[in-house]
């Protein structure tokens, strides 16, 4: 008898879950026995995401549920599917595209498989240290307006752009200089620009699914990984890593993805209610990020298993210069449209600054 590999079993289970979700519970009220639509029936909207353990995305989802249900005064119920219960980012994006869920939080590197121009946000040292400035650029900038149009052509409605906290490196060897980075095996997402961002710095990028990161670090399959401090803490990566370098080198950008037909089926009033909720949740997350990051860093320090390293200004500049080489790969992937988005984004940062 042929035994399925663990990866195939997981993929099969994800597919079954996707099919169940797609065919159970819909966002619109259903007709009663007379064929009339019961407008008083509570609408159930699903939100799928990868967050867990009250990390930033988990908090975003819970607050979205709280504020949306308040805004719709009990006429809407938000069902949350955290921790990749409905599949990874690629699967969740497909669910949103096909209307299997009303909302899905999807990371930009995976959206880049559909619209390569989004990969501009995955390059190192693209964003400012001012998080409110970054959020304003994503919410109101010309680059994201163009990206929204490109996404809609692929049957994806981007309802909100979410800026996660800055990512840092953890490792089993100290990273204080660019030279220290050479030859290390660093876990990355299955994303061309994530891979290139590590490669141009001289390390060996190793794509591994998020669910397998802890064990990969524990078994020394890789030397390190990159994630926001809150995620490093909530997933206890510090237990199996000796060093944490405060590089703040990149930011994971996510979108709230939906199906354009679902969005267009909503009344203008309901769309405005949801836009109000997105603005409120986004502002709250930015406000809380600093506090959550500081608390997470203190918990990591208190564990006593990981040394905290801060890059000098001089060494950080070397990382920035080396990272700029990744632009060639981005243009190769996204072409002239990608160059246009990149130029618009740089101009947006200057304008809003």
Image (cartoon, grey):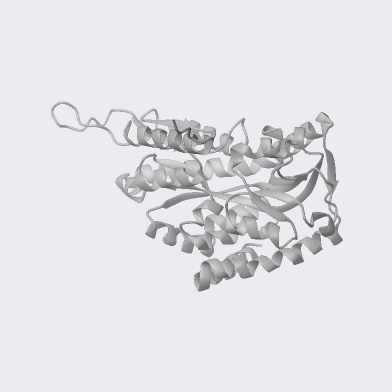
**Extreme residue toward the front, this view:** 1
Q: Residue at x 48, y 34 (%)?
A: 4
Rendered image quadrant of residue 195: bottom right
**Extreme residue toward the top, this view:** 33
Using the image as rendered, state which of residue 78 and residue 122 is in the foreground: 122
Q: Residue at x 85, y 52 (%)?
A: 176
Q: Residue at x 80, y 43 (%)?
A: 172
**Extreme residue toward the bottom, this view:** 336
Answer with left or right where residue 84 lies relative to residue 124: left
Answer with left or right where residue 333 lies relative to residue 31: right
**Extreme residue toward the left, this view:** 34
The answer to whether one can see residue 307 in this image is yes
**Quadrant location of the C terminus?**
bottom right
Rendered image quadrant of residue 344: bottom right
Picture coordinates of residue 89, whole percent (x, y): 50, 45
Answer with left or right where residue 258 lies relative to residue 221: left
Using the image as rendered, state which of residue 245 and residue 3 is in the foreground: 3
**Quadrant location of the N terminus?**
top left
Marker count (numbered): 0
Q: Residue at x 67, y 59 (%)?
A: 197
Picture coordinates of residue 143, whole percent (x, y): 53, 64
Picture coordinates of residue 261, whole percent (x, y): 32, 49
Picture coordinates of residue 348, whole percent (x, y): 59, 65
Using the image as rendered, state which of residue 40 and residue 215 is in the foreground: 215
Rendered image quadrant of residue 269: top left
The answer to whether one can see residue 124 in this image is no
């Amino acid at each position: 008898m042929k035994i399925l590999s663990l990866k195939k079993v997981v993929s099969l289970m994800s597919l079954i879950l996707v099919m169940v979700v797609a065919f159970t519970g819909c966002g619109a009220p259903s007709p009663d026995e007379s064929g009339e639509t019961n407008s008083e029936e509570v609408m159930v909207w699903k939100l799928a995401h990868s967050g867990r353990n009250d990390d930033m995305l988990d908090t975003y989802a819970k607050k979205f549920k709280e504020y949306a249900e308040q805004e719709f005064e009990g006429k809407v119920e938000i069902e949350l599917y955290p921790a990749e219960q409905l599949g990874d980012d690629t699967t969740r994006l497909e669910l949103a595209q096909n209307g299997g869920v009303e909302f899905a939080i999807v990371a930009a590197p995976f959206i880049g498989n559909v619209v390569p121009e989004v990969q501009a946000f995955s390059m190192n040292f693209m964003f400012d240290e001012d998080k409110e400035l970054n959020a304003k650029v994503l919410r109101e900038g010309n680059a994201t307006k163009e990206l929204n149009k490109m996404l809609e052509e692929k049957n994806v409605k981007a309802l909100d752009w979410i800026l996660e906290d800055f990512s840092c490196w953890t490792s089993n060897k100290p990273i204080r200089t660019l030279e220290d980075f050479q030859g290390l095996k660093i876990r990355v997402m299955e994303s061309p620009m994530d891979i290139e961002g590590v490669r141009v710095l001289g390390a060996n990028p190793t794509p591994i699914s998020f669910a397998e990161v802890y064990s990969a670090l524990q078994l020394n399959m890789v030397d390190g990984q990159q994630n926001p401090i809150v995620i490093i803490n909530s997933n206890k990566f510090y237990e199996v890593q000796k060093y944490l370098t405060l590089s703040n080198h990149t930011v994971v950008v996510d979108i709230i993805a939906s199906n354009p037909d679902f969005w267009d089926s909503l009344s203008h009033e309901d769309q405005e209610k949801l836009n109000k909720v997105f603005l409120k949740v986004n502002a709250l997350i930015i406000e809380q990020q600093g506090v959550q990051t500081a608390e997470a860093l203190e918990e990591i320090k208190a564990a006593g298993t990981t040394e905290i390293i801060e890059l000098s200004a001089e060494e950080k500049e070397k990382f920035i210069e080396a990272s700029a080489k990744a632009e060639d790969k981005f243009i190769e992937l996204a072409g002239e449209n990608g160059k246009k988005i990149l130029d618009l984004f740089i101009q947006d940062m200057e304008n809003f600054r």
